[in-house]
Amino acid sequence: MKKRDYPAIYRVMHWSLAISMLLLLITIFLRLTWMEKVHVAGIIEGYLSENEQSLTQDQLIVLAKKIRKPMWDWHIYLGYFITGVYVIRLSLPFFGHMKFSNPTRKGLSRKVKFHFWTYIIFYACLGVSLFTGLVIDFGPAEYKKSMETIHKLSIYYFVAFIVIHLCGVIWAELTNQKGIVSGIISGGQKKEEG
């Protein structure tokens, strides 16, 4: 297989999405673990009881939410950033860059079709995640609950995509596409000897 070159626009889009989505995943992980509201409320309650003070469970939850709010604000900011990158990514093919590959084209191997379909499904799911996040933030209150339910399911496609993507990269690097990792970092062009 020929060595692939990765133009600067491709690398910027790839790493912008990759880094921002990993940071977004960290905010989700924190919210579900150490910064989970009941957990934080329990820490506050323990501290208060050691000092012979108390708050109601509702007050503890409100305080816990206030403590984790700055962390969760980053989730929202990252969502806005990813939305911008996503819009740019979908616009690039109209300017002759980063065209989406057709997985139904004749003569493609199963591996290549799987590769193409994976990215199409990823971008479709990402679009749903971003849309639901924006509706939660800016949409009518009556849609918030249903959008939150859909939005929370986003973590499953995202984790699945990360696993598939990393396995594919490792497989490619170890088989017929050596240098794929360095290519996505440096561009993959051969250096001139001189």
Image: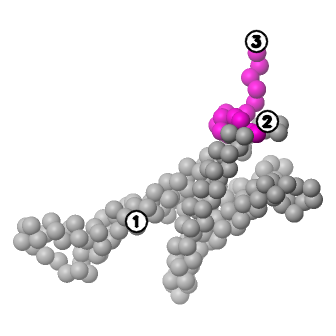
Callout 1, which amino acid? Arg
For residue 104, side relative to residue 174 (left or right) = right
Quadrant in which the C terminus appears:
top right
Res. 139 image quadrant: bottom right
Part of the protein shown in magenta: 176-193
Q: CA distance from mark 2 to mark 3?
A: 22 Å
**In this rendering, the label closer to the viewer, 1 or 2:** 2
Quadrant in which the N terminus appears:
top right
Nearest to N terminus: mark 2 or mark 3: 2
Q: Is residue 65 part of the magenta span, yes or no?
A: no
Q: Residue at x 80, y 54 (%)?
A: 112
What element does badge 2 sit on? loop
Outermost residue, top side: 194
Which label was assigned to residue 3? 2
**For mark 1, does the 10 Å Cα neighbourhood hold few (<14), some (14 to 19), or many (20 or more) residues?**
some
For residue 133, side relative to residue 45 (left or right) = right
Give the dominant element type of the magenta stretch: helix, strand or loop: loop
Which label was assigned to residue 47? none
Q: Is residue 92 visible?
A: yes
Which label was assigned to residue 194? 3
What element does badge 1 sit on? helix
Residue identifier under label 1: 31
Callout 2, which amino acid? Lys
58 relative to 78, above or below:
below
Callout 3, which amino acid? Gly
Outermost residue, right side: 106
109 relative to 194, above or below:
below
**For mark 2, does the 10 Å Cα neighbourhood hold few (<14), some (14 to 19), or many (20 or more) residues?**
some
Q: Position of residue 143 (x, y in %)?
A: 56, 84
For residue 161, side relative to residue 148 (left or right) = right
Q: Is residue 69 visible?
A: no
